[in-house]
Image (tube, rainbow, N blue to C red):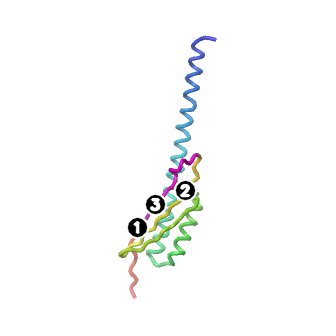
């Protein structure tokens, strides 16, 4: 066996795990970014429902949890706050990451003005 063969196999032995880390890291980042989008969409839908007076806060929170769950967020929690003519909806959950080191939780919020009801 020549020295060149040993050198090339050593290079590949170091290169393959590095390439796998890059690929898996890219997949992880994509899953996490998708989870952020799902959380934002769930918060936006709940905020619209509350702002336009089309149901109770409980109905809006249940809808946000359904949207988050169908988008892949585990253990979604919804918080609705009404302050000074605005509604703020925060959705928090965990995406299904391949390797979760505790940094995977996502939390997104939407702030929307409450519609005035004229009678």
Outermost residue to the right: 1
**Mark 2 lies on residue:** 94
Is 12 placed above or below 111 here? Answer: above
Label 3, label 1: how many angstroms apart (C-alpha)? 10 Å
Q: Is mark 3 on a helix, strand or loop?
A: strand
Q: Which mark is residue 2?
A: none
CB of mark 1 within 8 Å of CB of mark 2? no
CB of mark 3 within 8 Å of CB of mark 1? no
Q: Residue 108 carries which label?
A: 3
Specify the quadrant of the image occupied by residue 115. bottom left
Image: magenta residue range: 99-110
**Mark 1 lies on residue:** 111
Badge nearest the viewer, 1 or 2: 2
- Magenta span contains residue 105: yes
Outermost residue to the top: 2
Is 43 placed above or below 21 here? Answer: below
Q: What element carries label 1?
A: strand
Outermost residue to the front: 102
Mark closest to the chain's N terminus, 1 or 2: 2
């Amino acid at each position: 066996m020549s020295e060149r063969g040993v050198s090339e196999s050593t290079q590949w032995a170091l290169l393959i795990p590095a390439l796998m880390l890059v690929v898996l890291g890219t997949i992880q980042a994509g899953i996490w970014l998708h989870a952020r989008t799902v959380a934002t969409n769930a918060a936006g839908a709940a905020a619209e429902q509350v702002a336009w007076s089309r149901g109770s806060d409980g109905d809006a929170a249940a809808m946000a949890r359904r949207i988050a769950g169908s988008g892949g967020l585990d253990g979604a929690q919804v918080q609705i706050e009404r302050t000074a003519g605005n509604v703020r909806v925060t959705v928090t959950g965990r995406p299904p990451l391949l390797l979760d080191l505790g940094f995977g939780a996502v939390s997104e919020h939407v702030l929307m003005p409450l519609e005035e009801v004229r009678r």
